[in-house]
Every structure is written in C-alpha cells, then in structure tokens.
Image: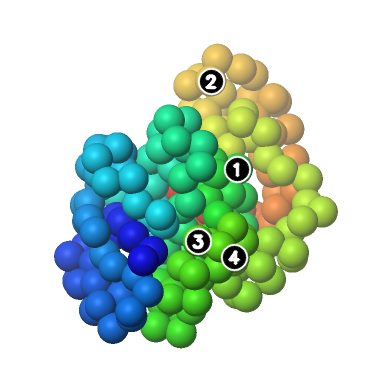
C-alpha cells in the first residue's frame, strides 16, 4: 500500500484527492493537512510514502514545508500540486526537494500515475510545466536585488521612491530596471511585473 498525505488549504481539493485515491487498491490517504506547519507535524507522525503539497498556503507555504520535511527526512517523497506553471516557482520547488510537480487542472489524468512513479523513485513534472522550464532554461536569472526592485515596482513605487527605500542612488535603480527588463524580455515596467508574476519569480 502506498500511504499518502494530502496538504492543501482548500477542503474541496483534499476531498477530490481523497475520492481519486479511494478508488485505488494499491494506495490509501492516511492523513490531511491544511497548511505547511500542519504538514510537517503530520509527516512526523505518519511518515507517509508520498506527500502531495500545495504551494500557496497560510502560516507556512509549500516550499518552506518541503524544505522543513526534507531537512528532517531526506528520504521524503513530495509531489507539488499547484495552479502555477511558472518556471521560477517550479525550480524553487525542485531545489527544495520535490520529486514531482503537477498542475491541479491535470490531477484527474495524472495524479495516480505520478504517485506511483514518485513512490518508485522517479521524478515527474507535467508536460506543460516541463515546456515552461525548457523555455527559460538558458535565461539569465534575476539577482536577489533585482527581484527586490521588481517587487517595489509592482507595489507602485517610482525610481526615486525605490532608491530611498533601498538606500541607493536613482541611477542605480535605473540600471537595475534596465537589467530586469533585458533579462525578462519586457517592453516596459508593467510588462516586467506581469512576466515576473507569471513565471513565479515573485509573489504579491
């Protein structure tokens, strides 16, 4: 029996997972959690074979929960379930130790097969996600400072306000903005923010 832990802050999603798993003879849902902290506790108590982890949750998000679980239990097998296909988000999850990455829209088709594959020691990402990663594989990533500037742009700050908040010159901010737009292939500041959100480089 493959013992599964489902982590999602939406009961409807957890119910859907429970129904899918309930139809199988080789797996069972042994526990549920509604945020990252609960997930870590449930993992410690139950030691599931495969954990299904949402990313956007209150208290502790999915990436932090993956890091915490894998820090304590390096053998933990975790599959991310999310609505976000952004390559930066996927890369963060895989770096944190996820073995799989599935979009919630494809659960009915791919969930059970993915659970079995990850249980068998394989890594799985849905085709849509793989395409997104491949598309940006050779891109130069934004630095931490550039991501910080992009967040401040998203919050509606002008260059002068960003310079004041970061204690740098306005010229430096202009240079950061120019780099951000070049790296993201953006036409203007708003476009850069849109791309950053779509790719999961930062969250609002």
Q: Is residue 152 left or right of residue 30?
A: right
Q: What label sits on residue 166 in the rendered view?
A: 2
Residue 51, position in %: x, y? 38, 55
Residue 79, position in %: x, y? 46, 58
> Which circle, 1 or 2, is nearer the viewer?
1
Residue 102, position in %: x, y? 49, 68
The residue at which mark 4 appears reads as 124
Is tag 1's residue or tag 2's residue first in the polypeptide sequence? 1
Q: Which residue is at a point 29% across and 49% down the rendered structure image?
A: 57
Picture quarter with the N terminus: bottom left
The residue at which mark 1 appears reads as 95
Look at the image and tell me whether residue 204 can be seen. no
Separation of residues labelled 3 and 1 (CA atoms)? 19 Å
Is tag 1's residue or tag 4's residue first in the polypeptide sequence? 1
Q: Secondary structure at mark 2?
A: helix
Separation of residues labelled 1 and 2 (CA atoms)? 28 Å
Look at the image and tell me whether residue 97 can be seen. yes
Is tag 4's residue or tag 3's residue first in the polypeptide sequence? 3
Does 163 appear above or below 121?
A: above
The residue at which mark 3 appears reads as 119
**Residue 53 is drawn in which quadrant?**
bottom left
Q: Residue furthest right?
A: 138
Q: Residues within 10 Å of mark 2 (few under 14, many from 20)?
A: some
> Which circle, 4 or 3, is nearer the viewer?
3
């Amino acid at each position: 029996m493959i013992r599964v832990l489902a982590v999602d802050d939406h009961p409807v999603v957890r119910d859907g997972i429970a129904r899918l798993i309930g139809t199988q003879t080789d797996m069972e849902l042994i526990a549920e959690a509604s945020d990252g902290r609960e997930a870590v506790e449930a993992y410690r108590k139950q030691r599931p074979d495969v954990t299904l982890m949402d990313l956007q949750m209150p208290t502790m998000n999915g990436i932090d929960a993956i890091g915490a679980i894998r820090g304590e239990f390096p053998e933990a097998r975790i599959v991310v379930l999310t609505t976000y296909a952004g390559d930066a988000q996927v890369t963060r999850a895989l770096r944190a130790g996820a073995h799989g990455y599935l979009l919630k829209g494809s659960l009915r088709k791919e969930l059970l097969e993915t659970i079995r594959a990850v249980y068998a020691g394989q890594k799985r990402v849905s085709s849509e996600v793989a395409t997104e990663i491949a598309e940006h594989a050779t891109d130069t990533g934004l630095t931490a400072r550039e991501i910080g500037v992009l967040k401040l742009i998203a919050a509606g700050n002008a260059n002068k306000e960003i310079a004041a908040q970061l204690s740098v010159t306005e010229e430096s901010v202009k240079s950061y903005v120019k780099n951000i737009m070049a790296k993201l292939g953006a036409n203007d500041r708003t476009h850069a923010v849109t791309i950053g959100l779509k790719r999961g480089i930062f969250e609002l």
